[in-house]
Amino acid sequence: MSATGEVTAGRPGRGRRVILWRHGQTAWNVERRFQGSTDVALTETGVNQARRAAGLLLHLRPDAIVASDLARAADTAAELSVLTGLEVTLEEGLRETYAGVWQGLTHEEIITRYGDEYAAWKRGEPVRRGGGELETEVADRAAPVVLRHAEKLPEDGTLVVVSHGGTIRTTIGRLLGLEPHSWESLGGLTNCCWSVLGEGARGWRLLEHNAGTLPEPVIGDDV
């Protein structure tokens, strides 16, 4: 992290990879209800998505797994843990964006009650949705967690980070050095799909985005 508090990209000349994997489906995803930091469990479909994705991610030979401590992410990570034998480290810093009074509301209810605030967010303006966190604050807490665990990898190691759509998007934006107003240009992740960052000579690069799509529509807080 720099003296200004910004997270800097990883050291050049190393071949580490970070796989940012979104959790499986929840009932609130299906209902288009904003979850934020509310702890909502996976549906049966979500568990099956996690098992299928874990079978694919196994072939990328992960060296470590870290996950948000919210159940939908921790339970998704557990499916990969079973296959790899790796322990999952739970991190509160990887939770989804806290969105205050938006949490628990449907997409339509948010548009109706907080339309101006919603529109400003989509324009890339710094907005405390529902009185909650700024996107930059989410990146401030999540990106250092990812970097701290990535630093523990061997030079060609792979870290799997199991988190949430909004948190993954802001973390990718921060690690790539993008300006916050442009983070919205990174499309959302489908449930149980992932993005891959690779470390090159100039820092982190986006190698894959929304990989593993069947395809399925993207549903969740980050849509």
Image (cartoon, grey):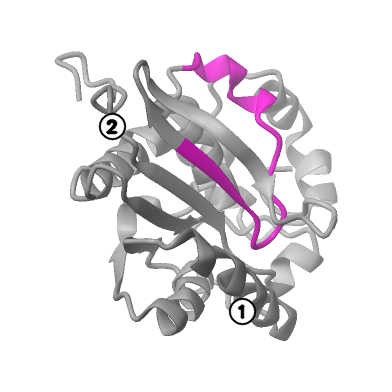
Q: Residue at x 43, y 84 (%)?
A: 82
Q: Is residue 196 above or below residue 116?
A: below
**Which residue is located at x 48 percent, y 50 percent?**
19
Determine which of the numbered discs, if any, sits on residue 14 in the image.
2
* Total numbered labels: 2
Locate residue 8: give its quadrant: top left
**Residue 189 in magenta stretch:** yes
In the depicted structure, whether residue 189 falls above or below residue 192: above
The residue positioned 34% from the left and 81% from the top of the image is: 85
Q: Is residue 201 left or right of residue 153?
A: right
Label 2 sits on a secondary structure element that is loop
Secondary structure under the numbered disc 1 in the rendered image: helix
Q: Residues within 10 Å of mark 2 (few under 14, many from 20)?
A: some
- The amino acid type found where label 2 is placed reads Arg
x, y (%) of residue 199? 37, 31
159 displayed left or right of 125: left
Q: Which amino acid type is shown beneath numbered disc 1?
A: Arg
Q: Position of residue 103 (x, y in %)?
A: 61, 56
Q: Is residue 18 magenta?
A: no
Check disc 1: other Cα within 10 Å, few if <14, some if 14-19, many if 20+. many
Which percent across, then down, holds residue 46?
68, 76
In the image, residue 171 lies at what x, y percent? 45, 36
For the question of whether residue 211 can be seen, the reply is yes
Please give the range of residues in magenta: 178-197
Label 1 and label 2: CA atoms lie apart by 31 Å
Q: Quadrant of residue 74?
A: bottom left
Q: Residue furthest left?
A: 3
Q: Which label was assigned to residue 51?
A: 1
